[in-house]
Image: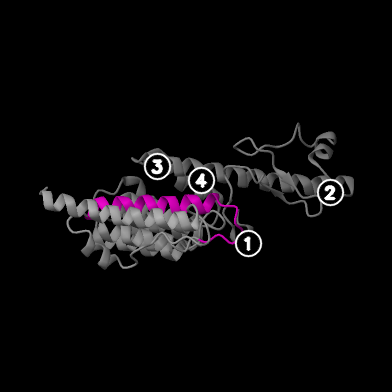
Amino acid sequence: MTRRAAVLLVLLLGSVLGLQAVHERRSGPPGGTAESLLYVRSPEAMKRMALSYHSLLADVYWIRAVQHYGGTRLSTDPTKQYDLLYPLLDITTSLDPHFRIAYLFGSVFLAEEPPGGPGRSDLAVALLQKGLRAQPDKWEYAQAIGFVHYWWDQDYMQAAAWFRRAAEMPNAPNWMAPLAAVTLAQGGNRASSRRLWQEVLNNAEADWLRVQARFRLRQLDAMDQITALEALIEEYARRVGTRPRTWADVVQAGFLPGVPLDPDRFPYQLDPASGAVTLDRKSTINPLPIESSRRR
């Protein structure tokens, strides 16, 4: 690196971080409603400004995207917005079109349902398709698109098509091939969801993907438990003539040995009026996926 190039790089990064510091003094920490983390909204303009240091600046924007997502997710503001998430990810992946983690993690951030994310599965797919344009043989991106359609959109035809496409790509693992058939045959039930995530857990090479699979499997465990508990509440009501007010009523009647806990050891919440069972607000597996027509 020449001395002149080094000076230009320092000035470039210094201006970005300086703007960030000035803004945060005015607007507060990431996640606030007044934030404006995105200083250059055009990926092409940023690529020109970055000179030959695209990858380094991509790292800066990826960190800002993660901070924006994490800060917004943890915010208690009821009107919190993730409106800068996609633009930050778009710039990140324009600066470094081979930024694999930004595509895969970023798509999860975008697809996650509110309040845990913006609920923009369309943008998640757009980001992954951008990755495929940069690397047409990257089977992981096609598989991830299939998961977005399966898990968040519940569009099993599209999910199966993308799983099939991923299976046909070079270096795709042999466990990808059955996913399309499984999705079409069993799409929409938790058993097939569990099989898909278990395949990911057993075969994923990246630690972050295994962590994500374990998280989703715990969510599926909770959903199965909630279904069983709600059926038990209805059986209690049929026998006793009224729904229980608390779990203590259910325990005293001999239906349960104790207060039921979710997979992360938080007590389930019982609505005495409706008999609905939900997660404790503090549970780390919130929010559960929204099921179409209470699919099983």
Residue 65: quarter of image? bottom left
Q: Secondary structure at mark 2?
A: loop
**Numbered disc in front, either 1 or 2:** 2
Amino acid carrying mark 2 in the image: Arg
Describe residue 160's horizontal placement relative to residue 34 as left or right. left
Residue 216, which numbered label? 4
From mark 3 to mark 4, how far is it between C-alphas?
Answer: 12 Å
The residue that mark 1 highlights is: 293
Q: Is residue 218 above or below residue 273?
A: above
The residue labelled by disc 2 is 243
Relative image position of residue 5 (x, y in whole percent): 14, 53
Residue 147 appears in the picture as rendered: no
Range shown magenta: 54-81
Q: Residue 281 in the image: x percent, y percent?
A: 65, 46
Report the side of 3 relative to 97 (left or right).
left
Q: Earlier in the sequence, mark 3 or mark 4?
A: 3
Q: Earlier in the sequence, mark 2 or mark 3?
A: 3
- Number of the front mark, 2 or 3: 3
Q: Which mark is residue 208?
A: 3
Q: Earlier in the sequence, mark 4 or mark 1?
A: 4
Identify the residue shown where x is 87% and y is 49%.
242
Q: How is the image coloured?
A: one colour
Residue displayed at 46% across by 45% down: 197
Q: CA distance from mark 4 to mark 1?
A: 20 Å
Q: Residues within 10 Å of mark 3 (few under 14, many from 20)?
A: few
Residue contact at pointers 4 and 2, CB within 8 angstroms:
no
